[in-house]
Amino acid sequence: MTDHQGPVLSSDLAGTSESGAQPDIDVAAPHDLRRAADLLRLLVSLAALGVTVLLAVATRDFARKAQQGLLSAATALSPGLRDGLVGTVQVIAILAPVAALVVLVVQRRVDAVLRVLPAAALGAAIAWTLTRLALSDSRPELWPEVLVGRGGLVHAGWPSAVYLAACASAVIAAGPWLLRPWRRALWALAVSCAALGVLAASLVPLDAVGALAVGGTAGSAVLLMAGGPADRPPPRAVADALVACGIPLAALREAPAQRQLRGEGMLYGAETTEGARLTVRVLAAEDRNRDLFFRLARRLLLRHPADPGEQTALGAAEHELLMLVFAGRTGARVAEPVIAYPVTGSSALLVTVGQDVPIPDEEWTDALLGAAWTSVARLQEHRLAHRALRPEHIVLAPDGKPRLTAFARAQLNAPPEVLGADLAELLATTAVRVGPSRATACALAGLGPTVLATALPYLQPLALVGPARREVARYDRPAPARPRRGGRRRTLRPGGRPNLMHDLAEEVRTACDAPAAKPAQLARFTWKSVLGLLGAFLVLHLVLPQLANAPAALDALRDAEWWWLLAVVPVTFVSQAFSTCLQLGSVPGRLPFWPTYQVQFGSSFLNRITPGNVGGMALNLRYLQKTGIETGAATASIGVQSLAGAVSNAVVAAVFFAAAGQHHGGVHLDLPAGKYALPVIALVLAAGGLLGLTPPGRRFLREKVWPFLRAAGTTLTGIASDPAKIAIGVVGALGLPLVQVVGLALSLHALGGDLPFVQVGAAYMAARLLANAAPVPGGLGALEAGLIAALTAFGVPAGPATSAVLVYRLLTFWLNVPLGGLALGFVRRRGYV
């Protein structure tokens, strides 16, 4: 669609307003909200900040040399010019923030000031932390000498990156209350100050870029937490647009809050001088931003998203008007369109006839659902996809019958996967309200068995992207477990969590007498493709360098005692048994041993391809959730496992070190606590103030944090009150490192190494502590190097030590890959995860 000024208007609605009569405008008081533009800016700023930190940390030497070259070029300027640039920057840095703050105060923008001050403080705290922890080592060594003798109003090193970040944060936080020219001017001043500071060599380039990125991050975070004004035209502008397009407007009223849907425009009810009632939906920049996130999510998740390209607000309104016309001609009951028309400020409105009434969840009857499904059948017959079929888009017309609305994302000549996703979305969202059986029966009555059966391949969570997916997730969330009488523990069933999509598929197969359908391949990325890419990366960057030791290992294997090597094989299975005991001891309820054991094997496979055991923890969390445990309690259980593992490793290491007489092994760790403690404390205080001092922050604490902490506290209390749980957990936590020491000792003995068991344990624990700090999966490479170094330090010859370590890792680390992969596929097929 193209921009036009010629409205399409029904003749019975055309007319002119009475001379001098002003329409009655009744709207709710404006309120702050979380805007999609702030979230988009936050993500972009975080990406820029991440790239900056990555360059400073991962390429430290290169960054230092590159920045030294830029500073050398800057110092080639004449001293007078540099001093002039520094003075200009300092004048702007002093006057611009003061002037902006005075303007906000004079205009009584108290809400803006309450965003600006916390944003500036948060930006300064983050920048101060960043410059000391991440950016300090990437600065050129000669940079402080460049500033000697130079200056403007004050020392040349001011404004610093911390001050610049505070100013940028304030500009972002004040943006929603400023006109676009002022907003752009202030942001241009901040960028210019950074660029001039780099040009005058008073700022290091990475510091300047990091400061601007921190400003975008902190300012956007404050706006997301505290809210900001919506990017929508005022009601008077909407009324003027309605009058301009020929509608004799008598009254305009904003729809109640419960009818307003995020990202779908602002709804108004209008009345003409002739008494006709209309529905007006106004689309603005806020809706375009939210639609951008919707399209990005679909492009990331789906193989064929089938989304339209970028549209202006007027283009989106015209598209919806056209789709309503086509939908009405199919025989479906839909809202009757009147006009699409531009509104000031790059917004647009869409007018439809009548003021429909939303249907409350408790008033959905079989007759209403059947009539709605009949309209859907007409759309399916003509291959017109709605692409947002949910109960909130089915309204009650004045004649008491349902009709469909919200065709903004509708698509003509839709492919089968889009049509099937329509059916799956409406089935799932109505099943949340009336149950799977009633939802399926009503769909069967309106569609017939042939069309309904086409939804079977799409009854999967990936077919639902957006609000429908969140509704299904809430439905599948387990109810809080009630305490059992007499202190009896609840027996948990793997895969026992509600699964609406599975239940719907069973109902549809039974109702249509259809065979089981293979789920459609909707995902852009599958488990196999992701794991394949990770495995290829692992082989190229971590495994291939170790093949250089393969000839020495083969030579040592020729003289190995094979019976002792075979004794190492059970270590893999026994270690998973101990891991299972640790998980059984960290859950208040009773978990079955065998499914949990299989999940632990799957976790070990994921830990081979993810650093820090992240994959294993995520799989265990999913497993506990699927058994019916709340997310907070499941997370607390995973935390208890990690804490118990860390404590047990420390205890076992201390015992082995003491027994081996290695109190002073020559390793001294220099940890400047003050360097890290102060920035961390500053960030914690800033985040705590942001959460505690803003209404959205307090609501987040009340609705999210405290329920999570209560669930975690209940979990810990249930574990602590059960001696059997504690005993099982202690056995699992201590058994995990000990069985690995046994495996290493057996491998060393099989290859001719002679070392006391306590010294083997000390060598293993020392290497394990070092490998845990390495950001590689399972300490790959780091653990092998540490073990070889420790064993040789104890007097084991280099050949047997190297061969023993390689064989030990082959039988305890790499053997888990095929076994864990098989276990992961099995537990997924059984619905445990």
Image (cartoon, helix red, strand yellow):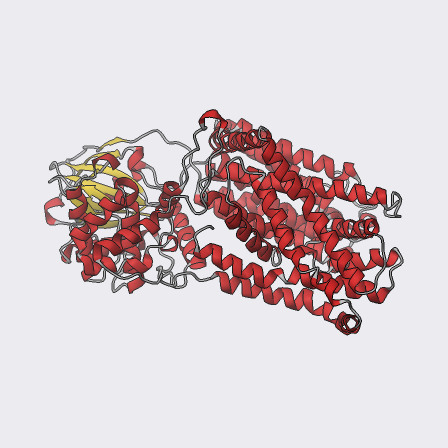
- Picture coordinates of residue 208, whole percent (x, y): 67, 49
**Which residue is situated farthest in the top direction here?**
486
Residue pictured at 61% horizontal, 51% vertical: 576
Q: Residue at x 20, y 61 (%)?
A: 450
Depth check: give the residue in front, 248 or 407: 407
User: Measured from the top left, where is residue 691 in percent x and y?
Assistant: 54, 31
Query: Looking at the picture, how far across and down is residue 518, in whole percent?
Result: 34, 63
The number of callouts visible is 0
On the question of residue 101 being in view, the answer is: no
Residue 767 in the image, given as x and y percentages of width and height: 77, 53
When asked about the image quadrant of residue 511, the answer is bottom left
In the picture, measured across the screen, residue 232 lies left or right of residue 182, that is: left
Which sits in the foreground, 180 or 675? 675
Can residue 714 be seen in the rendering of this structure?
yes
In which quadrant is the N terminus drawn?
Answer: bottom left
Q: Residue furthest front?
A: 563
**Image check: 262 left or right of 368?**
right
- In the drawing, does residue 111 fall left or right of residue 805? left
* Rendering quarter of residue 460: bottom left
Q: Is residue 617 above or below residue 555?
A: above
In the depicted structure, whether residue 776 falls above or below residue 617 = below
